[in-house]
Amino acid sequence: MASTAITLSHVDTKSPARASTASLHSRQHTLQWNAAGSRTRQQKADDVAGDGLPDTWFSLHSKNKQLKEPIYVSEVMEKSINPSFAFFDLEHTEPAVTRGDDCIVRVWAREGAVDDWLLLLEVDVNLRSLQFVGRNLDTFHHPLPPNCLLFQLSDGIYTAFTDLPGDSRNLLGRGHKAGPRELSSSFDALMQLANLDDCIQDALKVRTQLEQEVNELLLGSHRHHALGRTFAGEKEQHSTVYNALQSLRRQTLQLNRRKADLGTALESRRAATRAALADAGYQSRRRHRLEDELRVLKEARARVIDQSTGQMRRVGEDLLAIFPIEALKSKPLHFTIGKLYLPNSVFDDTNRDAIAAALGFTAQLVYLLSLYLATPLPYPLEASDGNSFVHDPISIGLAQRKYPLHPISVAYKFEYGVFLLNKDIEFLMNRVKLRALDTRHTLPNLKYLLYILTAGSGELPARKTGGIRGLLGGSSLSRQGSHESGLGAKESQDRVHSESRRNGSLGLTRVTGEQVGDMDGTFVTAVKATKAAARLS
């Protein structure tokens, strides 16, 4: 049976299950639909549907009693009154099926949500007695009865209905015969095919017998095979257990090695811990010792700072005594140094020698302050009475680096030198965290700086033994013993002023400059000790 499809026409679930046999000689009439009108057909359709259209499927059975199972079971067509099932092919079934010319078709249906399937139709079909309808149903106008089966084979559509009149059947027969004739095989070829089919069937029977004999032999030796399977299973289990044992042994060896490595690492860590504890004890003792030393140094630093502050006050008082800076009552913010008036960056040519001497005093005072404050000047000074100079090693593109601090014919050089001197004073003020109100005010800024340096409460500290080693008048004015070195600031100031009155005002510059330049190094030593203590902390 080649590719085949089955269509069920006008499903009627009200009709009881029945069995019919279709043949060319006898037909059974079920229901007459020829004279039925549209109202009747609509009523029948409503009866079929009920609460809903039926679900249908069919099964194909063989008449061979040895084949108890269905040959084919179709899909379920839901909610359809004219179900058309899919094509199916029986080429791969047994020869008893493919060579047979009759079968049983059973159609099953159910209505609505009913779970039980009911046998709607059972038809005993003989393929030789099927009636040809046509290639398709386009030219077929005869009404089909309820529950009519249509078989769509490879060459057209066939049916097994039994209610057609005789003339209609003759017309169908004549129409079928009028078709084109097709050549078929010869009798000899058909006989050869029949013989070949018989041989194939014999071979299949022999194969079936051999299979039965082999099965009997296998059943007879079932115990032997059971023992063999048991032995094979035990052997496989033994192999599995042996492999697992070997794996566990390897894991044990690895774990033992790992344990040994961990023991070695643990011992080394214990040794490192003991060494670290010992070193921690040493470091702790060393830290306590260093803390004690640091505390002592901080105390010494505090004492040195106090002493240095006092010494700086004393040095500032001495410098103010040596280079007195006094304000002019007639001009505000105008001062004299050594009773010589120095204008604030505005000079005239009326008293050039006095301006040169005042600038010489100022340069000497700034130079000494830079030494006592341990602050190198950005523009180095060359103080030499009324012939002082200032150097500019910083600026770029200058034709010369040395500028005078006394009036000369080229005014801009002198003015630039005074500007550099004022920048040095501003630099010293920044060193002690002061800010100059106006850089051009030379003596006011210097007075302000000395005022801050000498500010403080309490008595000024006495000069240490050793005093000032001056060079007043050669060897006769050299160091004259500890009594003179131990003089206070007032006695030293009076002595210096008496010597200056004997030697003149310009000599005062030379003598006092040498005296102050060779003062004892107490202040410088205190500053160095303070820096050392700060670095240690």
Image (spheres, grey):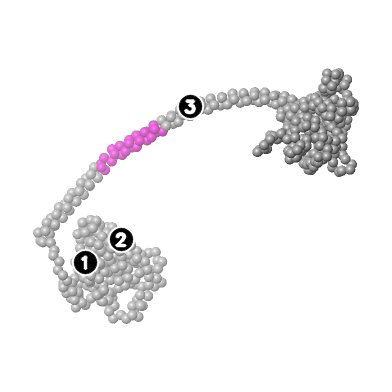
Between tags 1 and 2, which lies in front?
1
Residue 264 position within the rendered picture, expressed as x and y whole percent measured from the top left:
53, 25
Quadrant in the rendering for residue 229:
top left
Q: Is residue 465 visible?
A: no
Q: Earlier in the sequence, mark 1 or mark 2?
A: 2
Magenta range: 218-244
| Residue identified by numbered label 3 | 257
Asked if residue 467 is positioned above or below residue 102 in the image, the reply reads above
What type of secondary structure mainly makes up the magenta span? helix
Within-10-Å neighbours for mark 2: few <14, some 14–19, many 20+? few
Within-10-Å neighbours for mark 1: few <14, some 14–19, many 20+? few
**Depth check, front residue: 71 or 438:** 438
Q: Who's the residue at 87% across and 35% down the image?
A: 339
Amino acid type assigned to the residue bearing label 2 in the image? Val
Secondary structure category for the residue under label 2: strand
Mark 1 → mark 2, Cα distance in angstroms: 23 Å
| Residue identified by numbered label 2 | 73
Q: Who's the residue at 67% across and 25% down the image?
A: 283
Q: Earlier in the sequence, mark 3 or mark 1?
A: 1
Amino acid type assigned to the residue bearing label 1 in the image? Asp
Secondary structure category for the residue under label 1: loop
Within-10-Å neighbours for mark 3: few <14, some 14–19, many 20+? few
Residue 332 position within the rendered picture, expressed as x and y whole percent measured from the top left:
86, 43
Left or right: residue 443 compared with residue 84: right
Amino acid type assigned to the residue bearing label 3 in the image? Arg
Whether residues under marks 3 and 2 lie with C-beta atoms below 8 angstroms apart, the answer is no
Q: Which mark is residue 155?
A: 1
Q: Who's the residue at 37% across and 64% down the image?
A: 116
Q: How many marks?
A: 3
Q: Which mark is residue 284?
A: none
Q: Earlier in the sequence, mark 3 or mark 2?
A: 2
